[in-house]
């Protein structure tokens, strides 16, 4: 015999018995208020984490250094994917060498997982060149422990001064846990 739950103003939900009964079945409802559409089916976004920074970080040599942009997420399943979306604003290069560039690196904990760059090329006599760099990366951390994503950058030629978050610019990182 089915159980029918009527809505306060309209509609209803009906729970029916299985077609074949061979063992007990259990339906677990969420412990928090919400809807039953919390099903962790492939493609659902399970959680979102955002962080930003506006602290200027600069370099005049080729050593990789932290940009200050970081965020931590704890996946709910070892099968979850993490979609990393980030934007580095205020990428600055001062006059020195017109083929210099800023290389940016994405890390999961202490492991480099992606390199992207901003060439900041210019022609003629320019005092400063500003631009932005953004990227998306789909990661499979295969853990339910906390995972920290961060970026680093380096000055490619050390021929000029480079920086991120220059001029009061804000860089942001968003982590989306995606059910697999």
Image: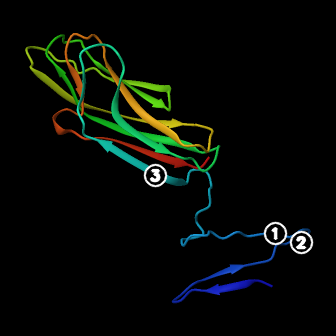
First in sequence, mark 2 or 3: give its number.
2
Indicate whether 105 appears above or below 48: above
Q: Nearer the viewer, mark 2 or mark 1?
A: 1
Q: Residues within 10 Å of mark 3 (few under 14, many from 20)?
A: few
Who is closer to the viewer here, 126 or 142?
142
Q: Position of residue 35 (x, y in %)?
A: 56, 71
- Residue 48 tag number: 3
Indicate whether 169 appears above or below 106: below
Who is closer to the viewer here, 163 or 129?
163
Who is closer to the viewer here, 124 or 175?
175
Q: Nearer the viewer, mark 2 or mark 3?
A: 3
Residue at 56% x, 50% y: name it. Answer: 43
Indicate whether 13 appears above or below 174: below
Q: Residues within 10 Å of mark 1 (few under 14, many from 20)?
A: few
Whole-angstrom CA distance, mark 3 to mark 1, is 32 Å
Residue at 27% x, 10% y: name it. Answer: 157
Task: Tell me: 9 left or right of 70.
Answer: right
Residue at 18% x, 39% y: name it. Answer: 168
Q: Position of residue 66 (x, y in %)?
A: 35, 28
Residue pointed to by mark 2: 21
Residue 90 occupies quadrant: top left
Colouring mode (rainbow / by chain / secondary structure / one colour) = rainbow
Task: Tell me: 105 left or right of 129.
Answer: right
Whole-angstrom CA distance, mark 2 to mark 3, is 40 Å
Element marked by disc 3: strand
Element marked by disc 2: loop
Residue at 27% x, 17% y: name it. Answer: 101
First in sequence, mark 3 or 1: give its number.
1
- Residue 25 tag number: 1
Task: Tell me: 110 left or right of 124.
Answer: right
Whole-angstrom CA distance, mark 2 to mark 1, is 9 Å
Q: Position of residue 99 (x, y in %)?
A: 23, 12
């Amino acid at each position: 015999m089915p159980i029918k739950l009527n809505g306060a103003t309209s509609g209803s939900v009906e729970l029916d018995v299985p077609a074949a009964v061979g063992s007990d079945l259990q339906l677990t409802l969420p412990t928090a208020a919400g809807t039953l559409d919390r099903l962790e089916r492939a493609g659902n976004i399970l959680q979102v984490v955002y962080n930003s920074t506006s602290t200027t970080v600069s370099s005049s040599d080729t050593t990789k250094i932290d940009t200050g942009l970081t965020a931590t997420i704890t996946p709910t399943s070892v099968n979850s994917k993490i979609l990393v979306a980030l934007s580095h604003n205020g990428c600055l290069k001062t006059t020195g060498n017109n083929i210099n560039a800023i290389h940016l690196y994405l890390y999961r904990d202490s492991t480099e997982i992606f390199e992207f760059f901003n060439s900041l090329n210019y022609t003629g006599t320019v005092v400063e060149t500003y631009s932005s760099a953004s990227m998306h990366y789909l990661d499979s951390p295969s853990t339910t422990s906390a995972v920290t994503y961060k970026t680093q950058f380096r000055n490619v030629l050390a021929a000029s001064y480079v920086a991120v978050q220059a001029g009061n610019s804000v860089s942001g990182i968003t982590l989306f846990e995606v059910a697999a």
